[in-house]
Each structure stands twice: as structure tokens, then as C-alpha cells.
Image: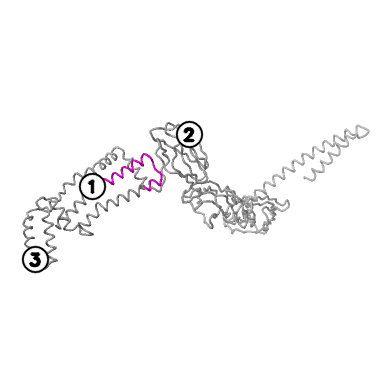
Amino acid sequence: LDQFIRKYYINQAIRGSLYFVGLSLLLFLTMNLLENYFFFSKGIRKAMFFSFIGVSALSLIAWVLVPLMHYFHLGKLISHEQAARIIGDHFYNVKDKLLNILQLKQQAATEGANTDLILAGIDQKSRDIRPVPFKKAIDLSQNRKYLKYALPPLLLLLIILWSAPSVIKDSTNRIIKNNEEFEKPAPFHFVLDNEELSVVQYSSFPLTVEVEGEILPDQVFIEVDNYQYQLTKQDANTFTYQFNNVQKDIAFRLASGMVESESYTLEVLPKPNILGFEVELDYPAYLQRKDEILSSIGDLVVPVGTNIDWIFEADHTDDIQIQFSGETDAESAKRFSDILFSFKRRAMKNELYKLFVSNSFLPKADSVSYSINIIPDQYPSISAEKFQDSLNSKLIYFVGQASDDYGLRSLAFHYRLKKSEGAEGELNTVALQKPTSKEVQYSYTWDLEELELGPGDEVVYYFEVFDNDGVNGSKAARTNVMVYAMPTVQEYEAMAEENSEEIKDRLQKALDETQDVKKEMRELREKMLQEDEMNWQQKKELEKLMERQQQLQKEV
């Protein structure tokens, strides 16, 4: 009987499983088809979902789990008497015999007398029913007839999944996600071609929309801040719209007729931006020039050696980099607050530089180029002019001028003596007046007698000036190198001989001119004797002849 009871519950579990599958699939298909057709609200979908869960759970418990529990002898089972009646109903030759045996056993257990008689009756009835297989009272194959409850909804589900899977998938998804609102399927829907809905701040963003469906609209609108704007139609199913100068996130949706899309958001990527900057110019001290602060001036013209400090004020900026021409790597400015950055450099040459601004969204988002042009410290200039004394050829006078763009440091006269035998002396320096301005006029008197020059000696000399360049060091400028050379012994002798011949020629010429003057005076005297009085013209001629005669006498 115990084996019969176990098979009894197995049979119930199999039958219950078929009932459960059939009922669950029927409810599942019914809900999905209704949802697909009517597109219920959140409340109805929630009620359908929990109703399905409840009915399915109750049927599973009642038809499957409870029989399985009884199979494992859990819970209240049918009694042997009930099992005997079921067996008796199934086998005609058993009828009430099995039930009588159970009743006799119970009577023998409760009554002490006539036990032998009762046991004999039990033994007789047991021999009568022993050939009967009780387990065959339950035929598990009879459950095939209950497949009619499970197979039709299962086949219908498979057909729908094969022919129109979206009917089941979409409806099931909406029923499960019963807290969400879903757009009712329309004859068409919108698809954004843009991979990302993000744009750099202050830039434009082109939106491209594809329309997919059986029916294509002629117009599509975009709704922004409760205002609608028409998109530009490119072809039958493509529309475009341009967002200009986007400064903040924009929420929008697409619409055409009664069809609306979900809400989208165009995200703005904050653009790093330099709001302004100052340039502090620290000039070299020797220039004696007051430091300056320039506002938002990037192209600089500064003296060489100027220390430059840029102070940038930036918005949405994590890093500011500066790259100078001729350098492969950019340098980062030092950040000393949320919006302030600083960068320092000494201007030593002409160069271009470029500013890059970056943040976590946009590395090197923008750049701007400027230039630094230096004003070099020019070389000083100097000039000199000499004059020899008319009475003393070894006394020389100099006058000159020296100047520089920023200032002079020293002025000196240099000379070197070279003897006739070839020995060269040391360079001698005579410091002149210390310049106190950018331009100075100077003078110097040089007495060569102090050098005790001999025949054939030479003196090389020049003036030199230094500027006050405090960056690269003082620079010098010189006058042309000048030479004073004493005549050699041979040159002195040649000069003496040349002077002697010249004197002779001059005496002879003077004597000849004296004879001519005497002749003219004689002729004038004879002419005057022939006349009574001397006229004015004759007086003038006589005076000229007398002056000429006196001059010739001096030359002789």
C-alpha cells in the first residue's frame, strides 16, 4: 500500500505539472496579447504582473509542490483505507477484500479475544488478493490525455515567437517593468544618427535624425523649452537641426503629429577658457626703468633680460601650457588658485609662444599664439677728431663724442710705443672722464714730447668706450687706430737736402721778380717825368710796385 500511495502522488504531480504549464502559458499569452493590443497603463500592467505571479504560484503549490511533498511523506497523506478503496474501485476481484483485511487487522489489534479466528480470516482474504498488483491501479501513461491543456498554449507561444517575437518580448518587458512609462508604438519612430549627444561649450552641434517605420512623416519638429522648431528635411527619412552657440545642457524631444520621442539631453562639455591675463615686466636694474604691468597684451616688445611673469585668469581650466618656438615640449603654468595660473620666463631672444588650455573633457581644447620681440642692448659708438699744434707738431689735441642706448661705463685713451729697432712696448691706458649719461663729449691733449721719441719710432693710439650692459656684460667700441710716426735718419737728410734746393729756387725767383719790378718802376718814372702832374691811377700803380718790392725783399 505504501508503494501505491507514493505512485499515487507521483501521478498527481505529473498531472498537476501539465495543468500548471497549461494555465501559466495561457495566462502569459493572454496578458501579452492584451498588452500588445491595448498598451495598458502602469497600474494595469502592475495588476496583471502580480496576478500572474499569484495565480502561477498558487497553481504550482497546489498542483505540483504539495503532491511532491506527500511523495516524500511530508504533510498529511491519504490513509490505507482510502488507498484500499481506490484499489478496490480499480480491480473488480478485489472490491472490498483489501478494505476488509485492513479492518480485521485493526479489530485484532484492539480486541484480545478471538484473535486466532480474525487472523485466519485475514490470511484467507490475503491469499485471494495476493496475485493482484496494486501499483497497476495507477497508470501514469493516462496522463497523456492531459497534454491537451499544456501543448496548445505552448505551440501557440512558439509560433508567435517565431513569426512575431516582438509581440512577446516587448509586451513581457513592459509588464515586468511596470513602474516605467513606455511610448506607444507608432507607425514610425525616431533614431538619432549622432553617436554622442555632447558638444563643446559655445560651439554648434548638428543633430541628424533618421525616421524608421512603415509610414514616414513629412515634417519633424524638435521641442526645446516648450517651443517647437521644424527640422530641415534632407531626404524622405532624414532630418537635421543645428544647435548654435550652445552654452548649457539642452533637454529636447522629437515630435511629428501624435508621435513623440523620449526625452534627450544635449550635454555641454565646459570649454576651458582664458578670461584675461596680466603681464608683469621686471626690467633689468641697470636700465633704471620702472617695472610695468600690462593687461591682456600677449605680443611683447621688451629689452633683453626682462623677467616676464604672466598671470592668467581661466574658467573651467585644469591646465595651461606654454610652448615656445624651437622647443619640443610645452611647459605648464603654476596653478595657485582655482582660476589663477602663473608662468615666468626671462626674455633673451625673439621668439613665438603658444598658449594651450585644457580640462578633463577637452585636452588642449584651444590655443592662441603671441610673440616676444626683444630690444637688444646696442654696441656703444665713439668718434674722435685730432688737431696738431701749429707751433709744436708733437702736441696733439683731440675732441670726440661717445654714446650708448642705455648708458656708458668708462672712457679711455690707449697707446702703444714701437721703437725703430722693432721692440714693441706695453699698451698704456689713460682713463678719461667717467661718463654720467647716455652721451658724452670729451677732449684730450697729448704731448708726445713726454714719450721721448727718436727717429723711426711709432706710436699707435685709439680711444675706447664701454657701455653698462648688465645682461650680457659690457660691450666696447673703439675709434679707428691712428699712428704717429717719427721720420727716420734717412728721411731727415732727404728733407734737409730738399729744403736747400727749394730755398735756392725761391731766391732766384725772387731776384727775377725784383728785376721786373725795378724795370716797371723805371718805366713809370719816365712816364711821370713827361707829365706835369701824377694822376690817381699812376699813384695806385706806384703804391702796388712799392708793396711788391717790399714783399720780395722779405722773401729774399
Q: Earlier in the sequence, mark 3 or mark 2?
A: 3
Could you tell me how far apart the alpha carbons at marks 1 and 2 are, in whole angstroms? 59 Å
Q: What element carries label 3?
A: helix
> Which disc number belongs to residue 260?
none
Q: Which of marks 1 and 3 is in front?
A: 3
Q: Does residue 291 appear left or right of residue 108 in this picture?
A: right
The amino acid at mark 2 is: Thr
Give the magenta range: 21-47
Could you tell me how far apart the alpha carbons at marks 1 and 3 are, in whole angstroms? 49 Å
Residue 384: percent from the left, percent from the top? 66, 50
Residue wearing tag 2: 232
Q: Nearer the viewer, mark 1 or mark 2?
A: 1
Residue wearing tag 3: 115
In which image quadrant can residue 234 be found? top left
Q: How crowded is mark 3: few (under 14 residues within 10 Å), some or many (20 or more)?
A: some
The amino acid at mark 3 is: Thr
Q: Is mark 2 on a helix, strand or loop?
A: strand
The verdict on residue 219 being magenta is no
Q: Which of marks 1 and 3 is nearer the N terminus?
A: 1
Q: From the viewer's side, name the closer residue of 347 and 58.
A: 58
How many labels were placed on the picture? 3
> Which disc number belongs to residue 18?
1
Could you tell me how far apart the alpha carbons at marks 3 and 2 are, in whole angstroms? 106 Å
